[in-house]
Amino acid sequence: MKRIVGLTVLFFLSTIGYGQKGNFAIIPEPVQLTAHNGVFRLSAATVIQTDNSELEKLGRQFAKWIAPATGWNLPVGKSAAKAPGVIVLKLSKAVKGLQHAEGYRLSVNPQKIVLEATTEAGIFYGLQTLRQLLPAPIEGIKKTDTDWEIPAVSITDYPRFGWRGLMLDVSRHFFPKEFVKEYIDQMARYKFNVLHWHLTDDQGWRIEIKAYPKLTEVGAWRVYRSGRWWTHEPPKKEEPASYGGFYTQEEIKEIVAYAKERHIDILPEIDVPGHSLAAIAAYPYLSATGYLTYVNPGSKFYNIEDNTLNPADERVYNFLDTVFAEVAALFPFDYIHVGGDECTKLFWSRSASVQSFMKEKGIKTEDELQSYFIKRMEKLLATKGKKLVGWDEILEGGLAEEATVMSWRGMAGGIDAAKMGRNVIMTPAEFAYLDLYQGDPVLEPDTYSMLTLKSSYNWNPVPDNVDDKLILGGQGNLWTESVPTGRHAEYMTWPRSFALAEVFWTPIHKMSWNHFQRKLPQHFQRFDHAGINYSRAAYDVRVTAKRGGDGRTLLAKLNVDIDGLDVYYTTDNTNPDLFSQKYTEEYIVIPPGIYHLRAQTYRNGAPVGQLLIIGRDEIEKRAPRKKD
């Protein structure tokens, strides 16, 4: 930890000094920002002035955030006539320049800070910006002696999209209530407003349903396995299922209330009709095959075991009616996510009862059968006062009338839905899947595929020739097959979610990769003080390879996302330093016989990234020889 903090400070000192006029590190970047001369000095005598009880609550939240680092408990009240410095929180029916209910205006001068908005949400987001204008140690959990100065500035700000989400998968690995709250706090810092909570899947059912106690008695637990996902052994006979957990309804109410205080809605997901092994393990009659099965521990099962609900059995709809009634009562958000993704049709095609049902209903294909199922889910949710969201597979066989499509297999599904006049949430894997490698696989914890920080940042969720009003927004998705702990969940979420926060909030004409990467060190420093984990993979070397024109020569390209870094490398099995070969050509030749390429990034003569050591065999895999 000391090494990481030291490197962060080095980065911090190598950037332009924070607080100088015209230099700010606010994420997401505001719509309009004008710097002025001078600073507001926060002190123990500063008063937070409000004009109603809800704003008093927000003022107390702000005071609570900064109390550990400052040692002050700033008073919150209606009168501040004698205060030497005052922070004014003000609600107005109309605020000049604002175009969104979540917007705010912030004015800082040496005597006073005024934050005004038309809604409490706007005040909340303005306080997040104010928090970022304070020096980074403000995020610390212990008192720090520093000058608590806020640069004079005028900011007018509002979000590009109304839906700014992150998804947390708690089925593959269970994360306790306390961590979920911490994750919500982290989201709130960066103005996210939707937590998509993936509560059920093949590997665990995480929500208490009082009418069906076996869902948590059986479905919430599996045998423990570690190692690479999909390589795990199935449970052995009599092996205890002791790994897992679930949230009681009281805990869910507590988390929902906690999120609401931070202006975050929670979108619950009950994944049906596929991805249902945990439910089927508890109640085998829910599948068409009726097999006795177990909660999957990460072993291969697709098209081997039946993980789909039976769309031909009325008992399934009765079950879901009861489940969704309890879910709807717990979550006040307008939407419920029903999944609809990766549903195998194999077992439906083999089931005589399902095939007979299809013939009776005039359903020609299994895709149409899934569409029938989803349309029934939409009507069922409507009786609970909820709207349906599903992954883009719900387009197959015919889209339900009012469904909102969450497009993950690229953006094509979202484009198709928008052309049909339906609302869309963009979350394509190639830009928004937070479970992917964020640096070279030889340096990173095991997962699959690749999503760099720069790729996330340079994504535009609105495709050409689509009505942008139908794009509600987007979200990053943290699937957790290869994420067993909360610390690793943080590592995979940040800093790519810094990038997504800006994608979802900041106007496209204000987006700047060059400026964004200069802001990163200060946010790393904030996370260091707060004890939040994050990845520095963007500063590491990433290797791609190809063959030369002769088809045999092995060539390697050394990629780095962050600008202004020097790369030094060796091919003689020694560690590189400033006296080694400097990387200047697009590709370097990997000579025959060498067994390691080593490379490292430097800035201002000091190493900043991890030392990359990659074997020749691995480079060969990345540039396979053409067959004769």
Image: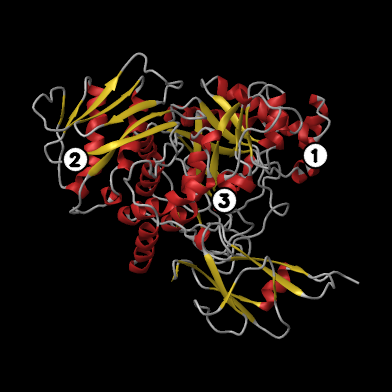
Circle 1: element type: helix
Label located before the other in sequence (1 or 2)? 2
Give the residue type at disc 2: Leu
Label located before the other in sequence (3 or 2)? 2
Determine the residue positioned at 55% across, 69% down: 567
Q: Nearer the viewer, mark 1 or mark 3?
A: 3
x and y percentages locating residue 365 in the rendered image: 82, 34
How far is mark 1 from mark 2, CA to CA? 73 Å
From the image, tell me which residue sits under label 1. Answer: 352
From the image, tell me which residue sits under label 2. Answer: 42
Determine the residue positioned at 54% across, 64% down: 238
Nearer to the camera, 550 or 231 = 550
x and y percentages locating residue 71 in the rendered image: 15, 47
From the image, tell me which residue sits under label 3. Answer: 454
Local crowd size for mark 3, using a 10 Å CA cut-off: few (<14), some (14–19), many (≥20): some
As drawn, 173 above or below 507: below
